[in-house]
Image (cartoon, rainbow, N blue to C red):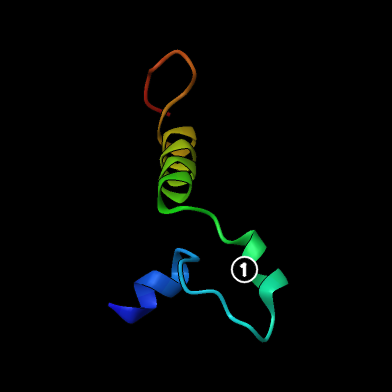
Amino acid sequence: MPGRKKARGEEKSKDNPAAWQNIESEEDLALEFMDALLDRCCREDGKPV
């Protein structure tokens, strides 16, 4: 998938290289998503909200 390479920053644009500095890795995004999901579903003591 050509879009996947671009999203991961492997194929940087020559027009605006600074725009690619803010792209996070897939793993970072997945961890951020899981943290947000857990914050929404569970309290710190592990019990459901």
> Furthest residue to the top?
45
**Residue situated in front as seen by the camera: 15 or 25:** 15
Mark 1: give few (<14), some (14-19) or many (20+) Cα within 10 Å: some
Residue 7: x %, y % from top left: 45, 69
The residue sitting at 63% across, 83% down in the picture is 14
Q: Determine which residue is flagged by label 1.
A: 20
Residue 22: x %, y % from top left: 64, 60
Residue 2: x %, y % from top left: 33, 80
The residue sitting at 49% across, 18% down in the picture is 44
Say what amino acid the circle numbered 1 marks.
Answer: Trp
> For residue 12, which quarter of the picture?
bottom right
Q: Tag 1, which secondary structure?
A: helix
Against 44, residue 32 (above or below) is below
**Residue situated in front as seen by the camera: 7 or 41:** 7
The residue sitting at 49% across, 43% down in the picture is 32
Left-right relation of 37 to 19: left
Against 39, residue 27 (above or below) is below
> For residue 46, which quarter of the picture?
top left
Residue 30: x %, y % from top left: 40, 47
The residue sitting at 41% across, 40% down in the picture is 34
> For residue 41, which quarter of the picture?
top left
Left-right relation of 25 to 5: right
Q: How many marks?
A: 1
> In the rendered image, which quarter contains the N terminus?
bottom left
